[in-house]
Amino acid sequence: MKLQVIVADLPLKHTFTIAHQSRDVQETVIVKLEEDGIVGLGEATTNPFYGITVENMKAALEVARPIIESSLWEGPEQLWSMTKSMFTTNPFAQCALDMAAWDFYTKKLGVKLYEYLKLNPEDIPTTNFTIGIDTVEKMVEKMKEVDWPLYKIKLGTDDDMAIIRELRKHTDSVFRIDANCAWTADQAIEYSQELLDLNVEFMEQPLAKDDLQGMKKVFKHSKLPVIADESCIIESDVQKCSGLFHGINVKLVKAGGITPGLRMIYEAKSLGMKTMVGCMTESSVGISAIAHIAPLLDYVDMDGAMLLSKDIAKGVTITPEKVTFPDRPGIGALLL
């Protein structure tokens, strides 16, 4: 087995702004595993908010290289367990490796990942299309540029409700809103009734992740379902979110890959919570991987590659009606 780490820049169509950062280019790391002519690909993007850089992802992968390139592991779950201690501070690098291992493993078996997991691609929910924070005029332009039945609106400004009211004038599409920890409990509860009236489906992470008392209050009084994001990073967080949120948004890069992501999804389901997987502006490598596990989900946010002005890969094709998978085993992604 040979490990190769590839670094690339993903140029965005528009400056992407959320409550705590803006960017025009997204750095990403591609992990490539190759043996006997079979190539597995995985991906994780950098993230300054979580302190994840190209350098520390590469460093973490180098520590794990001896095990990765050995013949000590047979499948992705075994590799994940064997290298877990090496990625305690860098789950993003672990995700890229785990994704590549799943791609390699299912390619070796000659099956698509969703086939191996016994999932039906007809069950994939429609992804939302994300509208980042901008002037209201530019946010409207972005909606008109991509006519989509479901928009995720990034909020966290002093004029959040005015933004939603104005956007609603220009489309009948369903909204989801993501406040990225920017609200208080009282704000979230107050806003929830009007947001419901404005055809908003749910609120994602309205409060700071450590405001547990606030979330209890919101969970009890909100007119809308509330989905955890920053409050649900790793497997042990799922149980903690029960009774505070109606569902969880699993980010594979934060969780450490597909292996723990699947466990988080199944645990949330067992607790009666809604499940969602979100992206981190990945290329078609990461997005294709998400698509394969999407039949498990109630909601999905896998528009990352759609936000790019130039992709570095090709894989699944996403329309409002369906997700089309390439006729290739594994996750089906190829670098261009």
Image: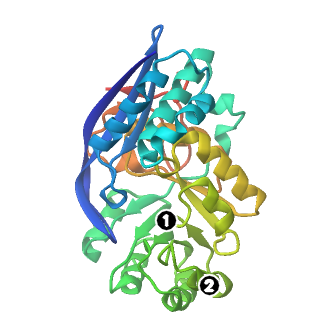
The residue that label 1 is drawn on is 230
Which of 39 and 5 lies nearest the eye of the viewer? 5
The residue that label 2 is drawn on is 222
Give, as a three-letter code, the residue at label 2.
Ser
Give the left or right position of residue 268, taking residue 59 as reference: right
Relative to 129, say whether 71 is above or below.
above
The residue at 25%/69% (across/down) is: 138
**Residue 237 in the image, given as x and y percentages of width and height:** 61, 61
Q: Report if the CB atoms under discs 1 and 2 are less than 8 Å apart.
A: no
**Residue 90 in the image, given as x and y percentages of width and height:** 42, 46
- Looking at the rendered structure, the secondary structure element under dot 1 is loop
The residue at 48%/35% (across/down) is: 316
Tell me which corner region of the image, top left, top right, bottom left or bottom right, holds residue 92.
Answer: top left
Give, as a three-letter code, the residue at label 1.
Glu
Which of 251 and 168 lies nearest the eye of the viewer? 251
**Residue 69 in the image, given as x and y percentages of width and height:** 45, 19
* Label 2, residues with CA under 10 Å away: few <14, some 14-19, many ≥20: many
Say the numbered circle drawn on residue 84.
none
Residue 317 showing in the rendered view = no
Which of 164 and 209 lies nearest the eye of the viewer? 209
Split into 4 quadrants, where in the image is the C terminus?
top left
